[in-house]
C-alpha cells in the first residue's frame, strides 16, 4: 500500500469523510465512529436504518476498550474473545452507556472486531482509533469485492476509496455474542 494513499485516507477521516477500503472478505465503508454526521452520511449512502447498529473495526483491542463495558462479560469470556483476534471474528459486547445510539442502534451492545487485514490494521493505527465498518453496498445488494466494483457502485457518493485487495475470504466475518458465545451469523 502506498503510504501517501494511507495518509490521504486518514486526512479524509479526520475531516468527517466516508471512505471505502478493503477488508478480509469484501470492501467496507468506514468513517470516524465519534462523528455523528459522518455516521449518518454513511447510513444514508448504505440505506441502512440507524436502529440496526454498526460494527467497529480496529487495529488492536486497546482501540475498542473506550466503547465497551467489559465488566458485563462473564468470567473467562474476554480471554476467549481476545484469543480469536486478530482475525475475521466479530463479537457483540455490551457497550458503555455513553456510546451513542448511532453506533449501538437499538441495542445496549456493540459489534467489534480486531482485524488481521494489513490495510485495515494500518488504517486504524494511522487514524488512532477504530473505524465504523460496514460492507460496501446498498442494503440488500451484493458488497463490492474490488476497488473498481466499489467505484462503479458507490464511487460518486464516497469521499475516497483506498485501493487494495481483500484477503479473499468467501464470507463476511463470523459474529458471536460476547456474553453467551452463541453464533449470531456464521462465516
Image (spheres, grey):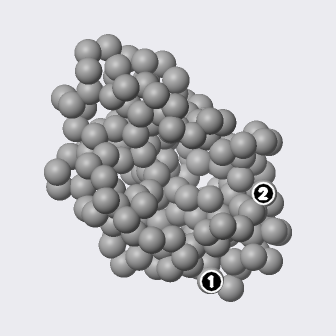
Q: Residue at x 69, y 77 (%)?
A: 154
Name the spot of residue 100 as percent of width and height, x first.
Answer: 25, 62
Please identify the quadrant where the C terminus is shown: top right
Please, is residue 91 above or below residue 52 in the view? above
Q: Residue at x 62, y 59 (%)?
A: 135
The reply, left or right, for residue 129 in relation to residue 124 is left
Please, is residue 126 above or below residue 105 in the view? above
Q: Residue at x 52, y 56 (%)?
A: 133
Q: Residue at x 51, y 71 (%)?
A: 48
**Chain-order first, disc 1 or disc 2:** 2
The reply, left or right, for residue 103 in relation to residue 148 is left
Q: Mark number for residue 11? A: none
Cβ atoms at labels 1 and 2 below 8 Å apart: no
Please tell me which residue lies in front, 28 or 160.
28
Name the spot of residue 167 as percent of width and height, x first.
Answer: 75, 41
Please, is residue 171 above or below residue 147 in the view? above
Name the spot of residue 120 as percent of width and height, x first.
Answer: 59, 48
Q: Mark number for residue 157? A: 1
Please tell me which residue lies in front, 181 or 134.
181
Q: Tell me if mark 2 has few (under 14), some (14-19) or many (20+) residues whose alpha carbon lies within 10 angstroms of its own.
A: many
Which structural element holds mark 2?
loop
Q: CA distance from mark 1 to mark 2?
A: 17 Å
Q: Quadrant of residue 69?
A: top left
The reply, left or right, for residue 71 in relation to residue 169 is left
Name the spot of residue 64 as percent of width and height, x first.
Answer: 35, 42
- Answer yes or no: is residue 143 visible: yes
Which structural element holds mark 1?
helix
Q: Tell me if mark 1 has few (under 14), some (14-19) or many (20+) residues whose alpha carbon lies within 10 angstroms of its own.
A: some
Please tell me which residue lies in front, 54 or 151.
54
- Answer yes or no: is residue 163 visible: no
Q: Mark number for residue 145? A: 2
Please, is residue 16 above or below residue 60 in the view? below
Amino acid at each position: 500500500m502506498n503510504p501517501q494513499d494511507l495518509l490521504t485516507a486518514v486526512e479524509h477521516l479526520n475531516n468527517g469523510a466516508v471512505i471505502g477500503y478493503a477488508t478480509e472478505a469484501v470492501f467496507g465503508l468506514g468513517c470516524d465512529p465519534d462523528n455523528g454526521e459522518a455516521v449518518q452520511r454513511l447510513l444514508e449512502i448504505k440505506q441502512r436504518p440507524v436502529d440496526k447498529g454498526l460494527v467497529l473495526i480496529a487495529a488492536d483491542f486497546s482501540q475498542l476498550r473506550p466503547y465497551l463495558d467489559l465488566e458485563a462479560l462473564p468470567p473467562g469470556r474476554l480471554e476467549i474473545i481476545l484469543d480469536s483476534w486478530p482475525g475475521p471474528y466479530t463479537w457483540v459486547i455490551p457497550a458503555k452507556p455513553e456510546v451513542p445510539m448511532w453506533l449501538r442502534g437499538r441495542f445496549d451492545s456493540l459489534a467489534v472486531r480486531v482485524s488481521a487485514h494489513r490495510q485495515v490494521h494500518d488504517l486504524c493505527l494511522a487514524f488512532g482509533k477504530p473505524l465504523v465498518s460496514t460492507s460496501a453496498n446498498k442494503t440488500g445488494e451484493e458488497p463490492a469485492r474490488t476497488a473498481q466494483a466499489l467505484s462503479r457502485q458507490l464511487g460518486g457518493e464516497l469521499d475516497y476509496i483506498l485501493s487494495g485487495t481483500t484477503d479473499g475470504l468467501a464470507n463476511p466475518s463470523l459474529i458471536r455474542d460476547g456474553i453467551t458465545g452463541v453464533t449470531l451469523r456464521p462465516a
